[in-house]
Image (cartoon, rainbow, N blue to C red):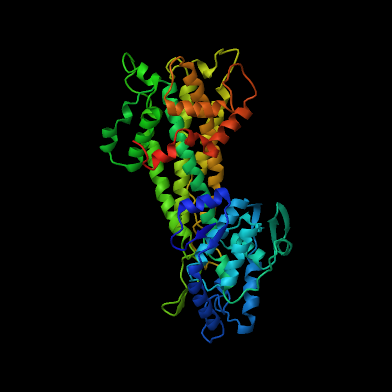
């Protein structure tokens, strides 16, 4: 059981839930705050003062007053009218993460939603009722309105959901799980559909996979360095201390640990005529380390947002006020997603150059062309390198910032939007491309290191080689390559590449 603590839930906790699907529950200590805010909203709904979203219309219609007896219908209409999402459904794991984030937000006790409504989200998570949430339709302005409306629709028995792997009408999915739809109270529809939880969930998923990819990239780059008999002099600690960037220092430290004990490295300390390696080898800590710094910063932004109250209006219980503001604007998430995208693109760009270097006999320090023992008759890894170039280029295009885009919506009431949903959704595709680039680099580096026999790489990298060779044999004569590429990329995605070299422990400071 994972207990979601408002204001204190960590990235590690959220990643564990997203990857492993553990049961979650909102911290029961949040209930007094939730109940107090709900009581304030109930009183306001029957009062004479116009309060946005409680007894008024929405957006440009905020000036239209709604009678107390119509507030329940108002909230139901709001949810249904906002179910305008299109495109492929969001995957189940990220949809459930979005639901958990909504629970965290409600747990701040500023949304005015009743405990029983929040509890239904918790029960859906516990029993496996997953709303069908189309992935397109949000501009990240007044929250992720359309995607969150589809989530809210399931809670009121509308729309569709999956249960037990079957796609059903939401009312049927709830019934099979032994749950009943909720009748929305004042402001509850607005509190459910307003907020950044769709964008934040997608951005977090992108962040989690980007961190796994960067850890794999560090390990694989060490194998590539040995494959081309590159120098480890650029990893000297004093060199990186003189610059001072934490990520650069950490990557250099981790690479030194991973490459320790390499016979290949020791064999060419003397008598190597090369003065310097190309940048893709020499500048790995500077490039990958900077990407690591950016990812860490983006992760902290997303951790804050995951614990935020981001709907509107917000109930300030201590002050006795219900205040309209703009916490729903997803600019922080949009910026974080753009930063993650830039990091993914650059990790792939430098990895692709290492692939290109290893297949080129003029750059690879006497490795055979395209890493095949019989070049000419065999093409080896020639076209695998071309695939990495295609994926690298695609990621460059996808890395174009989304947060600098905006378009006015809702009759110019929402006149500046974040496009955070666009920025966050593309990260899954970019990470898939990057894991394939890294998978190909792993295949190339393994071939290259094996051509250096009888010299051996270091103990950590030997474990990585063994992990690869357990699923992908060495390439002798040409064969159907797509399966090899897919299996290598799966090793990256699974975390086994980083695990083989204990990169996660090293990045967090576990070794020097």
Quadrant into which the C terminus falls: top left
152 w.r.t. 482: above or below: below
**Which residue lies most toward the front here?**
1
73 w.r.t. 22: above or below: below
Quadrant into which the N terminus falls: bottom right
| Res 149 → quadrant | bottom right
**Identity of the residue drawn at 42% across and 23% down:** 226
68 w.r.t. 364: above or below: below
Residue 75 position within the rendered picture, expressed as x and y whole percent measured from the top left: 62, 73
Question: Total of numbered circles in the picture?
Answer: 0
In the image, 449 versus 122, the foreground residue is 122
**Which residue lies most toward the bottom here?**
48
In the image, 417 versus 337, the foreground residue is 337
Residue 437 position within the rendered picture, expressed as x and y whole percent measured from the top left: 52, 33
Can residue 414 be seen here? no
Residue 34 position within the rendered picture, expressed as x and y whole percent measured from the top left: 51, 72
Can residue 484 be seen here? yes
Give the side of residue 321 with respect to residue 173, left or right.
Answer: left
**Identity of the residue drawn at 50% across and 34% down:** 497
Residue 241 position within the rendered picture, expressed as x and y whole percent measured from the top left: 27, 38
């Amino acid at each position: 059981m994972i207990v979601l603590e408002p204001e204190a839930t960590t990235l590690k906790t959220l990643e564990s839930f997203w990857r492993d699907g553990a049961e979650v529950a909102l911290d029961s200590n949040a209930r007094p705050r939730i109940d107090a805010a709900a009581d304030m909203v109930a009183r306001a709904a029957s009062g004479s003062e116009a309060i946005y979203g409680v007894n008024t219309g929405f957006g440009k219609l905020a000036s239209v007053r709604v009678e107390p007896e119509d507030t329940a219908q108002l909230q139901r209409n709001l949810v249904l009218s906002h179910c305008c999402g299109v495109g492929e459904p969001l995957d189940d794991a990220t949809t459930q993460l979005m639901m958990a984030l909504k629970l965290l937000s409600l747990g701040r006790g500023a949304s005015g939603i009743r405990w029983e409504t929040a509890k239904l989200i918790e029960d859906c998570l516990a029993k496996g009722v997953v709303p069908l949430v189309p992935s397109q339709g949000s501009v990240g302005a007044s929250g992720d309105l359309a995607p969150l409306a589809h989530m809210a629709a399931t809670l009121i028995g509308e729309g569709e959901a999956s249960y037990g792997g079957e796609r059903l009408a939401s009312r049927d999915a709830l019934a099979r799980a032994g749950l009943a739809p909720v009748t929305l109270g004042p402001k509850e529809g607005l509190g459910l559909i307003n907020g950044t939880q769709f964008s934040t969930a997608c951005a977090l998923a992108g962040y989690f996979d980007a961190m796994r990819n960067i850890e794999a990239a560090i390990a694989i780059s060490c194998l590539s360095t040995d494959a081309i008999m590159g120098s480890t002099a650029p990893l000297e600690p004093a060199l990186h201390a003189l610059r001072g960037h934490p990520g650069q220092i950490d990557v250099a430290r981790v690479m030194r640990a991973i490459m320790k004990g390499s016979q290949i490295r020791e064999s060419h300390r003397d008598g190597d005529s090369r003065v310097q390696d190309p940048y893709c080898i020499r500048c790995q800590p500077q490039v990958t380390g900077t990407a690591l710094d950016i990812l860490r910063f983006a992760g902290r932004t997303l951790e804050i947002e995951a614990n935020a109250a981001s709907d509107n209006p917000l109930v300030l219980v201590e002050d006795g006020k219900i205040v309209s503001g703009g916490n729903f604007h997803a600019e922080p998430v949009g910026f974080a997603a753009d930063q993650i995208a830039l990091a993914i693109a650059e990790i792939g760009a430098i990895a692709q150059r290492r692939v290109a270097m290893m297949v080129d006999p003029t750059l690879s320090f006497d490795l055979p062309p395209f890493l095949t023992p019989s070049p000419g008759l065999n093409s080896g890894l020639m076209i695998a390198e071309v695939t990495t170039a295609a994926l690298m280029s695609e990621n460059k295009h996808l890395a174009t910032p989304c947060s600098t885009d905006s378009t006015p919506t809702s009759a110019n009431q929402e006149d500046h939007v974040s496009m955070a949903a666009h920025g966050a959704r593309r990260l899954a595709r970019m990470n898939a491309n990057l894991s394939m680039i890294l998978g190909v680099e792993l295949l190339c580096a393994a071939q290259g290191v094996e051509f250096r026999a009888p010299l051996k790489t270091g103990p950590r990298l030997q474990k990585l080689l063994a992990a690869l060779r357990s699923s992908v044999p060495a390439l002798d004569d040409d064969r159907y390559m797509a399966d090899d590429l897919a299996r290598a990329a799966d090793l990256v995605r699974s975390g086994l590449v980083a695990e083989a070299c204990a990169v996660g422990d090293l990045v967090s400071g576990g070794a020097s």
